[in-house]
Image (cartoon, coloured by chain):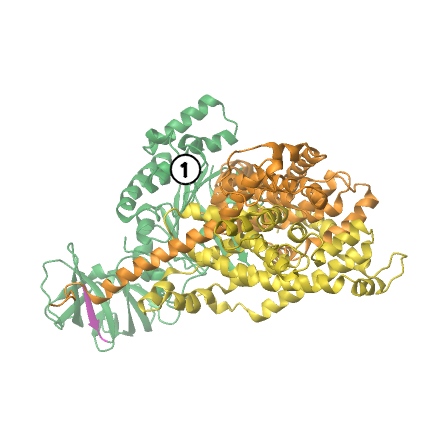
Amino acid sequence: MAEIRVERVTKLFKNVRAVDDVSLTIADGEFMVLLGPSGCGKTTLLRSIAGLEQIDGGRIVIGDRNVSDLPPRKRNIAMVFQSYAVFPHMTVFENIAFGLRMRKAPKAEIHTQVQEAAELLHIENLLDRYPSQTSGGQRQRIAVARALAMQPQVLLMDEPLSNLDALLRLEARAELKRLLNEIGSTTIYVTHDQVEAMSMGDRVAVMRGGRLVQVGDPLTIYDGPVDRFVGGFIGNPPMNFLAATIRAGDAGAVAELSDAGEIRLDAADGLGGHRGPVLLGIRAENIELHSRTGGGMLRGRVLVVEPLGSHNLVTLQVGGEQLKAITRPDERLELDQEVGVGIDPARIRWLDAEREVALTDDAEAGPGAGLGPPTPEERDAAPPG
Amino acid sequence: MTARLGWAPYALLLPSLAFLAVFFATPMVQAFGLAFQSPDGTFGVSSIERMLGDARFRSALLTTVALVVLIIPIQFALAMSMALVINARLKGQGLWLYVYALPLGISELAAGIVWVSIFTQSGWLNSILMGFGIIDRPITWQSAETPWLLIMCVVIAEAWRATSIIMIILVAGLQSIPREFIEAADVYGATTWQKVRRVILPMLRPSLQVALILRTILAFQVFATVIAIAGSGLFVLAREAQRWATDIQNDHIAAAYAGLILVLSLFSTVLFLVLLPTKDEQQL
Amino acid sequence: MSVVRHDIPLARRRSGREHLVGRALIYLAATLLALFILVPIYLIAVSAFTPPDRAFDFPRSVVPAELNFETIVFFLNAFGVVDSFWRSVIVAMITLVLALLIGAPAGYAIARYAFRGRSGFRLVILSTRAFPIVILAIPLAVTYRLWGINDSVIGVALMHTALALPFTVLITSSVFVSVPRELEEAAQTLGCNPLQAFLRVSLPLALPGLAAAAIFTWVLSWNDVFAAVILTLQNPTLPARILTALTQSPIYFQFAAGFVMLVPSLVVIFFIRKYLLGLWGRVVK
């Protein structure tokens, strides 16, 4: 059993709470992604689980053992570092064999394991070379092979793809996912790239400022962000958030947006009876644009049209705010054109206007929720992939 | 909260600290104890008075200071030139660096002897001058009767020997100046001299300060070079210290001389720290 | 008929010529400086290879007629020279081993651990460089007499170690800084305890830099004159032996002595030339 339980773990650096009272359970065989902007504590948490950092509070349990005070070598983990940390003074073979040699495995076994790991990563032809004679992409595979050769209970990966160039990253991502699915070990994967997180993880834990914001499977996080940060951090373009007021209407609640119109909602509006100011969250792909206004749609004015090949990204002025919508590439729109903005009420994500946290309890808000939208720096750290 | 191996760094430091305590701190303290004692065991300034009143004291002090004052500027000019040459990245840069760094491994004694072979009456300087017809009789460079000439010989020998270490410090400092500053100076039409004065020297201040302090402290200890070249024609503080310690067997006065060297070193260090303060704004 | 070419921009044309002249001047300066360093070395070598009976020839030619080993042999056969030579070698070896054994762990601690008092310790180490050897050697001679190790190889070696220790600490710390910490961490996740990670990963990678530190220490010990003279009497090291004999020996003895002392240093500097800049705490390419 290689379930991992992180129980109220805190890690301090001088007076800074790099990891602040984080609790997380990762099931056996699960692929959990730790996602967040730089400085959010995800790497510190990973290193704490590895045993490279000593925690200042809480405990870490792997399987049924409390490993909080154990050094890395006793935790039955393997780790892939962001810089790969491939030993320059050893051949590729010796690198991959390193862990097995430390375990004093018999020669024959070392040979087979190394060979297998190398074949899995398609580097079996590099075994006699030195790392300085390999490319960055190859070194990344060496690092992964070295970890896998240990057949660990737990695999920890710290942004293993972020040093690869964009094209290579795309391929490596798919390959890595396939490989890890085959191996089936419990994996914790740290990244700041939300596309990577969404595409690879069974579940994603979003972190900010040392705290957990939301944990869930990719789709839930995408459609049901727990606060403005998650909605703005995940997805490209970020989720739109509009200020609205809910009032009672004839046949149900009505969302009023100042200067832009109103949307009639039905019984299953997801508001739970809430009235008054709210934040209306809607993803760009759930907005439809019509050439005529009126009829339950909002009024918008086209500001920018960006043709991106597979779709157009349209920036609209709706009331006092800007909105981003996605349209088919052949839809003709003119600058300054007045359009009807159709929003599907079923896809709306309602947030409390004051705390900016989701009104419904379906996604449990972590302690780090409700701290405002992602800052430009935080947003920049997550490349559109 | 467990402190896993929190004691590790201190354990690793312990041998060094212990060693330095025994072989550095203790002798230092003892030296002061010795200096303020007299051979019969009483404490007081009698040994220091004895040193001050010694016939050779004044000469030793003046000669040492004169040497320091002469050696340092010459060495720095030389070292700066070498450093600029290295920085100019000529062809065969590795070779130039090796040649300029050669004296690093040369001891004071060997250096002194090298220049004796040049300055001695039947030595190379006279031979070459004679060969070029500049003189028709050998000049006595190394005579006790012309102390200033002797001092110049020592200055040249020391400049030859100890410039490398300064050059290395300056080269390291030069390499840390971002190229953009020098290129900007070029764009604004600065001549080489202006570049050196306005851009390079200011940014080199921290390295200059370190090099000056270190070299000056070492210069106050000038010893074997003087003995080799001047024999007993020149007195310097370190020589007096050694003489009192081994020849006359009076450790107290020897310690007094050593203390004086320390005081001069500290004084010059403070002087340099005050005259050449390193501002943090330099680290742009 | 205009001599001015209009197709080449004025600025470039001017800087092209200036550039060449500037470059030539730099080569000239470089050569002069190099000659300043090299010529005396050449001259002492010639002096050392001049037979004793020609030692006072004047004027002598810069290019020797023959290479004669008599002077050097005379020097090597002189009383106590060979013994003091070996003593110097032994002292330097002991110093090297001690300084590294004691200093490298401290260098490692400074490089790897951010502990309280780290900058204080560094300051202490740096400040020891400022203290004159003069003020250390004299009291130590007194202490050595008490301990009974006066005039001994081990006594001189201990003094030299104290002198070399600050250098080894600082050099080794910069060497270990240049070995990425992540390599050690990776080794730890693969089954190493901290010591094994150090031995299997950091040490092999730090070896070239450590070798440079070792050589630097060796040179320091080999060249020391003052402490050797103070701390030895009947069992001098080579520099001490030569210094005490200086005034009483013929001049050709000195030339041979100077040359013999010079040669190992030159060889050594050749071997560590790559690390010269690194010795001041910068990572050498």
Q: Which chain is yellow?
A: B
Viewer-nearest residue: B94 or A257: B94
Rendering quarter of residue A139: top left
Count of marks overlaid on the render: 1
- Segment colored magenta: A314-319
Does residue B49 appear left or right of residue C173 in this picture?
Answer: right
Q: Residue B248 location, x and y as percent?
A: 82, 52
Q: Is any atom of residue A152 visible in this view?
A: yes
Q: Quick one: label 1, few (<14), some, or many (20+) residues within 10 Å?
A: some
Does residue A141 appear left or right of residue C118 in this picture?
Answer: left
Viewer-nearest residue: A145 or C258: C258
Viewer-nearest residue: A85 or A150: A85
Most distant residue in the top direction: A108
Q: Residue at x 40, y 60 (%)?
A: B178
Colour assignment, chain C: orange
Does residue B6 appear left or right of residue A343 in this picture?
Answer: right
Does residue A129 appear left or right of residue C245 in this picture?
Answer: left
Q: Which chain is green?
A: A
Q: Residue at x 66, y 41 (%)?
A: C95
